[in-house]
Amino acid sequence: MKRILSLTLLVLALGGGVLAVAGQSPGDGLLPREAFVRTLVRLDLSDAQKKDVAQILASRKAEARAAFERVRTAADGFRMAAASPTADEASVRQAFRVLAAAGEEAVVVKTRIMAEV
């Protein structure tokens, strides 16, 4: 049960990060961090479970932030390439490949964290 709850929290937290990168907020307009805290409260985890999840997330925080920052940067580059009045097919394709690679790496980082939880 602890593992299921922990995985749920992690998916919600990281999913909120992906939504933030996309410029959206999850649920009822909450920021990803607020949504995470609300979910944590609703799950009614024991103090030990909360501590375990917090330690894992804290240990991987820098790695996850870096991965999502790469996604954000690549998404900005793609938007700029696609919206450019002088955009050509090759530059748009290249910008999308960079975005796809960054997104793939972010998913791998998320998967590593989930495996640890």
Image (cartoon, helix red, strand yellow):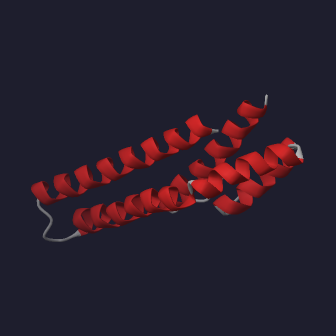
Lateral position of residue 54 relative to residue 97, left or right: right
Residue at position x 84%, y 45% in the image: 48
Numbered marks: total = 0
Residue at position x 21%, y 70% in the image: 84
- Please provide percent x and percent y for residue 40: 80, 49
Residue 22 visible: no
Residue at position x 75%, y 36% in the image: 5
- Relative vertical location of residue 44 with respect to residue 75 in this rendering, above or below: above
View extreme (bottom): residue: 85
Q: Quadrant of the N terminus?
A: top right
Residue at position x 14%, y 60% in the image: 91
Q: Quadrant of the C terminus?
A: top right
- Please provide percent x and percent y for residue 23: 51, 63
- Relative vertical location of residue 24 with respect to residue 9 in this rendering, above or below: below
- Please provide percent x and percent y for residue 9: 70, 44
- Relative vertical location of residue 14 with respect to residue 7 in this rendering, above or below: below
View extreme (top): residue: 1
Task: Give the camera-side residue of 4 and 35.
Answer: 4
